[in-house]
Amino acid sequence: DAGVTQSPTHLIKTRGQHVTLRCSPISGHKSVSWYQQVLGQGPQFIFQYYEKEERGRGNFPDRFSARQFPNYSSELNVNALLLGDSALYLCASTPLGGYSNQPQHFGDGTRLSIL
Amino acid sequence: AQSVTQLDSHVSVSEGTPVLLRCNYSSSYSPSLFWYVQHPNKGLQLLLKYTSAATLVKGINGFEAEFKKSETSFHLTKPSAHMSDAAEYFCVVSDLGGNQFYFGTGTSLTVIP
């Protein structure tokens, strides 16, 4: 079975542009979470979606938004890109939302570089 | 609030010797704890999870972790390090609703041949 897939794998943008990152969860998983991992640090939670509804939001500005589609895939959008947005963006999926003992299954991430 | 503290940013061991990666947690309830490994330019792979069933948890690739409530610790161990274990390791606690994972800052493991 395919794992969590993310696209693109690498992306280069300039300051002020916007970007859309995509994620397909493991088949049967209904919850998707997004994380930002800056070089040398642990991942930081951005959003969680379950059944197309936002279930959690981390401490990120409104420039960051996301949505989940009926097939449970998800997009993360970032507007007005800043140099500090350069990071590895990770997507994770779980079968359900709201159960703390479920491990999250991660994709390989999208490496976003801002010039 | 939930949080984890990884006590060592870097650990270096010789191949074939034991590995100990330390993690302390803070949680206002009985936590769910996880260890993940990240190889360079890759996503995160689950090593093991603790969800209050057994305090000694066995994971993949010979890793295990022991939950000690009295010490608020969840240290990761392996009896004998292999070169392929060289990677970044993250200790993680989830919130009560399971909607958010809180990651530690990571421990970089180097294995010396």
Image: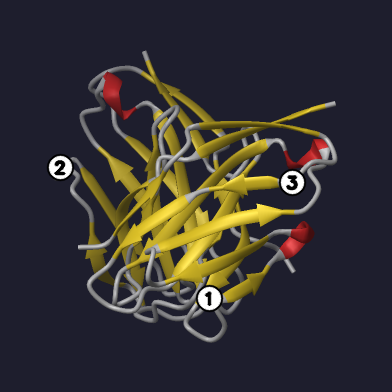
Q: In this view, does A63 lie to the left or right of B33?
A: left
| Image quadrant occupied by the C terminus of chain A | top left
Residue positioned most to the left: A62
| Circle on res. A88 | none
Q: Nearer the viewer, residue B65 or B83?
A: B65
Q: In this view, does A56 lie to the left or right of A19?
A: left
Disc tally is 3
Q: In which quarter of the image is residue A87?
A: top left
> Which residue is identified by label 2?
A61
In the image, residue B7 above or below residue B59: above
| Circle on res. B18 | 3
Q: Identify which residue is drawn at 18% across, 48% down.
A: A59
What amino acid is found at the position of numbered circle 3 in the picture? Pro
Q: Tag 2, which secondary structure?
A: loop
Q: Which of marks 3 and 1 is in front?
A: 3
Q: Quadrant of residue B13?
A: top right
Q: Which of B92 and A65 is in front in this view?
A: B92
Q: Identify which residue is drawn at 40% across, 68% down.
A: A69
Residue positioned most to the front: B70
User: Which chain is mark 1 on?
Assistant: A
The reply to whether residue B3 is in sight is: yes
**Do marks 3 and 1 share a subunit?**
no
> Which residue is identified by label 1?
A29
